[in-house]
Amino acid sequence: MSGPEPGLGVDASEEARAGRSEMLRNNVPYIAIVLVVLLFTIVSGDRFLSVRNWTFIAQQTPVLLLLAYAQLIVVTTGSIDISVGSSLGFSMYMAVLGMVWLGPAGIVCGILAATLIGFVNGSIFSLLKISSFVTTLAMLIIVRALLNIISDGGSIYVTEQAATGTYVDSVAAPWLLALGRFPNILIFALVVTALMWVFYEKTLFGQQLKALGGSERVLSLFGVSVTWFKIQVFVAAGFMVGLASLISLGRSGAGTPRAGEQFELDAIAAVALGGTPLTGGHGSVLRTVVGALTLTVVANGLTIAGVDPSWSRVARGVLLIIAIAISLNRRRIGVVK
């Protein structure tokens, strides 16, 4: 009676471990949100579970969620965009400034500004062959500096009623403030989520995103101009940042020089917590929703528990490390530097 072929048992064992690892990576977002909710339910009880608190969470999550979608589009290709926070702030200010100049239609200036930043990011990255990290780091600095120059350190406020006299540092846009309140802000985010799911999962562009993250060479073999496609990727991400700026402006009620600071880190964390590997190749819109919600719940739960806000950043940093450690597909990389 012959025994098993040499190496067959080892191969089967490795495949089983790989399967378990893949299952764990796919379910990390759901496990994380359940554990986080249970933890704060035990710690804070009724205050955490109250309708008022979850209404606040529903108002707070959409801006981060839309920024996470922008990051998801880029990360799926194996790149990264750390300029989304500065782009958000710049887009918010240009939107409200556009309304001062052109009336309600001027809000389009914000979306156009963010889309243009995406185009510049993609062009530098793709045409000049500068890494996405360095390109978007430089753009983070440049855009934030431009925002400070244009605003001269001042803010423009969104108000319910038009200001009287010569006061021009505000613009009346009650419809925008209404968009930033619950339930409108949640409905807006849900509509964008549905459209994003279709775009990411069902369109040719979405499939090409994953293909680019898997192998540029394979994508080029199908006749796709990789250089132009990379530009389109960052343009799409910029457009999503522009949409995020609308609800962020409605929620905050002002375009300020400091708007969007550190949001790029939260957007990356939300995508990583959603199980999307930073090496690219695949991702999930629904798991990104869970990742963004987890970050918001952690910040909210720690605040309710009376924890210093600085520790909230520490907690989210730890979550980011854990999420990346679990979601990283080490079979796709050699030496980590």
Image (cartoon, rainbow, N blue to C red):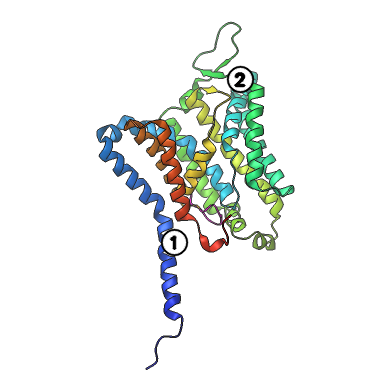
The residue at the point 28 percent across, 31 percent down is 47
| Contact between labelled residues 2 and 1, with CB atoms less than 8 Å apart | no
Q: Mark 2 points at which residue?
A: 153
* Residues in magenta, as a range: 277-285
Quarter of the image that includes the C terminus: bottom right
Label 2 Cα neighbours within 10 Å, binned few <14 / some 14-19 / many ≥20? few
Q: Nearer the viewer, residue 179 or 282?
A: 282
First in sequence: mark 1 or mark 2? Answer: 1
Distance between the alpha carbons at the discs numbered 1 and 2: 48 Å
| Quadrant in which the N terminus is drawn | bottom left
Q: Is mark 2 on a helix, strand or loop?
A: loop
Say left or right for 74 vs 51.
Answer: right
Q: Circle 1 is placed at which residue position?
A: 22
Question: Considering depth in this image, is 278 or 236 the residue closer to the camera?
Answer: 278
Q: In this view, does 283 lie above or below 302?
A: below
Disc 1 residue type (three-letter): Glu
Kind of residue at badge 2: Gly
The percent coordinates of residue 232 (x first, y second) are 66, 46
